[in-house]
Image (tube, grey):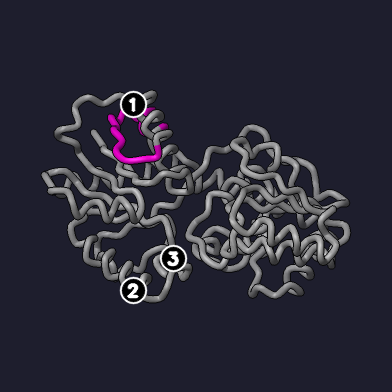
């Protein structure tokens, strides 16, 4: 099998993480893979891992994300299978209303040319966008050998991972700290509203409880030191941070955003918040802190969930199976 992966971006985010994992895993499956687009880092990964000189007759083209989908308008389809991967929630409301409607209409029209549509969670794309073509294949992560094995700490360690912006909602986590003097928050990432949040933390007197870490490539030390990951975003699909934290036995406290409730069951392998109220989060964190035995059970269940269904091997095997099934039909 030969697959061309198309991704058009200048930055490295969730969908680029997906492409990198896929390239590395396909290499172990003896699948020839070529890469087109950006960022440059993914080109290097592809050349280092999977040299493929014969790409004139690929088995499939995999269009990774919206930008690659739009690029399909410039391409002529041959006999190869066209596969599209939807990473974001189609109902993401971060853009202006008219832009959201244009995006939805364009995706609906363009998907008519595709043979297989992959969504990273059920919430990402309704069936009506490509009836009979859509398959859910969840993101997956590597399961680390090292993981958190101790119980919750007396001074509870909270973690947030991602760009610092209004959508990721670090503001809510910072605001909570004034009611939790025994909590510390590490914020991994950078973004345009960091200074505003620093000023908020100073105003409400919690700056000493916050570590502004910035962007880091190796997150493992931070997961190993954390008790809980906070996922408070307004819009998400199936974020890697949730999967990564769970793989380290770090449970997630999350709002019911995107496909996150598809992997987390409340009080079983994590905690689901019903709203964005500060009081709700404070009560949940206090309850967790006061129930160390329950915390250990949830932490163990979080890692077991990843091991059972959400590894990068599961993701890759399911994708290969879906492509092979469609190829057999075309033959």
Q: CA distance from mark 1 to mark 3?
A: 32 Å
- For residue 244, side relative to residue 101 (left or right): right
Across and down, in percent, residue 135 comes to 33, 57
Q: Mark 1 — residue?
A: 50
- For residue 108, side relative to residue 241 (left or right): left
Q: Mark 3 — residue?
A: 123
Secondary structure of the residue carrying tag 1 is: loop
- Neighbour tally class for label 1: few under 14, some 14-19, many 20 plus, Cα within 10 Å: many
Up-down relation of residue 20 to residue 98 (above or below): above
Q: Is residue 1 visible?
A: no
Q: Mark 2 — residue?
A: 101
Front tag of 2 and 3: 2
Q: CA distance from mark 2 to mark 3?
A: 17 Å
Secondary structure of the residue carrying tag 2 is: helix
Which sits in the foreground, 92 or 133?
A: 92
- For residue 242, side relative to residue 74 (left or right): right
Q: Is residue 101 magenta?
A: no
Q: Is residue 51 visible?
A: yes
Q: Counting residues from the N terminus, which is met first, the one under dot 1 or under dot 3?
A: 1
Front tag of 1 and 3: 1
Residue at image location 75% in from the left, 42% down from the top: 225
Q: CA distance from mark 1 to mark 2?
A: 38 Å
- Neighbour tally class for label 2: few under 14, some 14-19, many 20 plus, Cα within 10 Å: some
Front tag of 1 and 2: 2
Tell me where the magenta segment starts and ends, as one range: 24-39
Residue at image location 88% in from the left, 60% down from the top: 181
The quarter of the displayed image where residue 288 is located: bottom right
């Amino acid at each position: 099998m030969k697959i061309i992966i198309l991704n058009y971006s200048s930055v490295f985010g969730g969908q680029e993480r997906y492409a990198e994992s896929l390239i590395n895993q396909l290499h172990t499956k003896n699948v020839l893979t070529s890469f087109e687009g950006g960022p440059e880092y993914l080109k290097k990964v592809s050349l280092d891992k999977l040299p493929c000189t014969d790409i004139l007759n690929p088995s499939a083209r995999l269009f990774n994300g919206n930008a690659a989908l739009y690029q399909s308008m410039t391409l002529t389809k041959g006999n190869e299978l066209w596969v599209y991967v939807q990473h974001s929630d189609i109902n993401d409301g971060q853009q202006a209303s008219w832009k959201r409607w244009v995006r939805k209409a364009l995706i609906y029209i363009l998907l008519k040319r595709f043979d297989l549509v992959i969504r990273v969670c059920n919430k990402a794309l309704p069936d009506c966008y490509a009836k009979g073509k859509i398959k859910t294949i969840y993101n997956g992560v590597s399961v680390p050998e090292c993981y958190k094995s101790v119980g919750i700490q007396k001074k509870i360690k909270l973690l947030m991972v991602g760009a610092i912006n209004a959508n990721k909602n670090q503001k809510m986590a910072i605001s909570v700290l004034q009611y939790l003097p025994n909590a510390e928050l590490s914020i991994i990432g950078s973004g345009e509203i960091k200074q505003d949040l620093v000023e908020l933390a100073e105003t409400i007197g919690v700056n000493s409880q916050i570590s502004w870490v910035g962007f880091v490539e190796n997150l493992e030390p931070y997961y190993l030191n954390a008790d809980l990951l906070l996922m408070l975003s307004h819009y998400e699909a199936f974020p890697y941070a949730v999967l990564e934290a769970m793989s380290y036995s770090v449970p997630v406290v999350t709002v019911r955003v995107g496909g996150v409730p598809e992997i987390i069951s409340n009080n079983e392998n994590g905690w689901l918040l019903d709203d964005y109220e500060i009081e709700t989060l404070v009560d949940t964190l206090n309850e967790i802190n006061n129930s160390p035995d329950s915390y250990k059970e949830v932490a163990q269940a979080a890692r077991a969930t990843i091991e059972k269904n959400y590894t990068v091997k599961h993701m890759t095997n399911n994708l290969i199976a879906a492509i092979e099934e469609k190829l057999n039909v075309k033959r």
